[in-house]
Image (cartoon, rainbow, N blue to C red):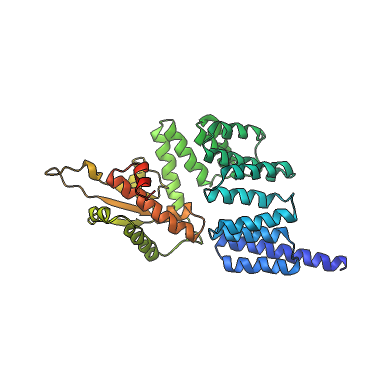
Amino acid sequence: MDSDEHKLDTDEITAHLDRGWDLVQSGDLARAEVAAENVLALDAESPEAFTLLGGIAAAKGEFEEALDHYRKATELDPEFVDPLLYAAEARLADGGNIDEALRLCDQALEVAEEEEDYLDALLLKSEALLQKGDLEAASETLEDLPPQDLPEAAYHLRAGRVLLETGDLDRAEEHLRRALARAPDLTDALHALGVLHEERGDAEKMVAANLQVRQADLKEPAPPWGIPQARFEALAEEALAELPEKLRKLLENVPVVAADYPAIELVSDGGDPRMMGFFAGVPYPEKASVGGLPHLDCVYLYQRNIERYARSTVEVEDEIRKTLIHETGHFFGLSEEELEALGLG
């Protein structure tokens, strides 16, 4: 093959890969698979193509298949950072082996040559340590971040979120404000600042930040994996049907309302603008057996917030169930441990 033909193949492969990842982001996984197959037709041992196939499988929630593709990509190119990081993310998303995710992050740190690859690996390692519950190690890991501004606002956001969870509020605020300085419309950073103000007990600043977040979120379109409202409501009904008969009986007169976002009054009163569900009323164990004032109980599910949290249609459907069960658990006055014991956690 002469140099012109090789360049043509390389350009075509790059175009297919770029298109494939764009399609994954838009939720068009069938056409993304076609893009990956087109790459393999040109280069049967393309680690990038197998990484793309892994990303497609992960978007479907098929994490074991995703890991198989990432392993293949790493076998083909042991110094390719992307499949290592995506495999670590798959381990974390699947609630699987966090220690394996940490091993993959360390492997990525060893081979990372580009600054952005190094930052991705370091931040993902801190997030994995946070998920493991090792707050001290998560915070210490971020001490290796360079002191200057990072290349993208998203890096500061990720660092700020980890530090917020570890309780290192001063360092968290520094990163979140750097993120907003780089990207003033980055509402995820503003939302995290609202949480930070809450942790400090500054209700006024928290509400101000949360109202800005709500206003910005209202303008955003539904994500590609969003579902019709009728389907959303049907899934909520299916989740209700999973409850034991005794609990369903108690919920007969408690409406489940699907809404896009929390009402402005709820946010003004200190509610999280990105909450996925909310129980309004008096928990069942606290209701008077006779007499007393009547209470209007209601369970709200916030569709756009659930879709925001999820990364695929499969995750949306799973999160509806989790959120509904969590909020009905509030109605019954059940703890998280009690929900788990009932098989409803």
For residue 172, say whether it is visible. yes
Q: Residue at x 67, y 61 (%)?
A: 18
Foreground pick, 320 / 306: 320
Q: Quadrant of residue 291?
A: top left
Q: Identify whether 165 is placed above or below 50.
A: above
The quadrant the N terminus occupies is bottom right
Residue 84, position as x, y percentages in the image? 66, 49
Q: Identify whether 199 is placed above or below 297.
A: above
Q: Quadrant of residue 128?
A: top right
For residue 124, say whether it is visible. no
Residue 231, position as x, y percentages in the image? 39, 65
Q: Identify whether 271 is placed above or below 232.
A: above
Residue 34, position as x, y percentages in the image? 64, 69
Callout count? 0
> Residue lying furthest right in this view?
2
Q: Residue at x 40, y 44 (%)?
A: 272
In this picture, residue 18 sits left or right of residue 334: right
> Residue lying furthest left in this view?
291
Residue 210, position as x, y percentages in the image? 42, 43
Q: Residue at x 56, y 62 (%)?
A: 26
Foreground pick, 272 / 237: 237
In this picture, residue 175 sits left or right of residue 194: right
Q: Residue at x 62, y 51 (%)?
A: 87
Foreground pick, 174 / 308: 308
